[in-house]
Image (cartoon, grey):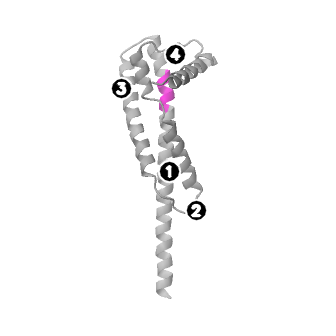
Amino acid sequence: MSSQTQREKEQFLNQLQSSASYRDTDFSISSSDEVDHFASLECDTESFARLKQIFTNEKFSPELLPFEFSVVDSIKEQIKKRKDIINETQFALSTQESEKSLSISNLLNFYQLELDRAVYLLRNYLRIRLRKVYFFHISTAVTFLIHFVD
């Protein structure tokens, strides 16, 4: 794991610790296995930023834009991996009752929230595209009928 990623994670945890609702919670991760496990949950910011960009472009464009197979496939794969990791970790934490499992559970909730955002954007991107395909199909059929009748 890169040192920049480790620093970003430490900054995030420090911000959480300093907030009023999490002041008494210990978010420290002790073993390198846990760090590696949480590193796999981190967002691929490049893919997520690209998804936000193509979602916004598609939403505000009057015409159907080219489909971004690589971005959609990458995001779908990341979503599936993260869901599996979060579910496995939550199952493992459900067998433990300690202060540390509570803090890791809180951290998992933040990762779940990030995952839900990605799912929301992907679903809405695909809905917008389906709506445009549907309306394009209807308008093409009407145009064809108007020209055919004349």
Q: Are marks 3 and 1 in contact (CB under 8 Å)?
A: no
Vertical placement of 66 versus 90: above or below? below
Alpha carbon separation for disc pair 2 and 1: 14 Å
Badge 2 local density, few (<14 within 10 Å), some, or many (20+)?
Answer: few
- Identify residue type, mark 2: Pro
Residue on which disc 3 sits: 88
Residue on which disc 4 sits: 27
86 relative position to 61: left or right: left
Helix, strand or loop status at disc 3: helix
Magenta span covers which residues?
A: 106-112
Helix, strand or loop status at disc 2: loop
Alpha carbon separation for disc pair 2 and 3: 43 Å
Helix, strand or loop status at disc 4: loop
Precedes in sequence: disc 4 or disc 1: 4
Alpha carbon separation for disc pair 3 and 4: 19 Å
Precedes in sequence: disc 2 or disc 4: 4
Residue 144, image x, y percentages = 47, 79
At x 44% / y 15%, what residue is drawn? 101
- Identify residue type, mark 1: Tyr
Alpha carbon separation for disc pair 4 and 1: 35 Å
The circle drawn on residue 24 is none
Alpha carbon separation for disc pair 2 and 4: 47 Å
Badge 3 local density, few (<14 within 10 Å), some, or many (20+)?
Answer: few
In front here: 65 or 16?
A: 65
Residue on which disc 1 sits: 125
Vertical placement of 138 versus 27: above or below? below
**Extreme-front residue of the structure:** 3
Precedes in sequence: disc 2 or disc 1: 2
The circle drawn on residue 62 is 2
- Identify residue type, mark 4: Phe
49 relative position to 32: left or right: right
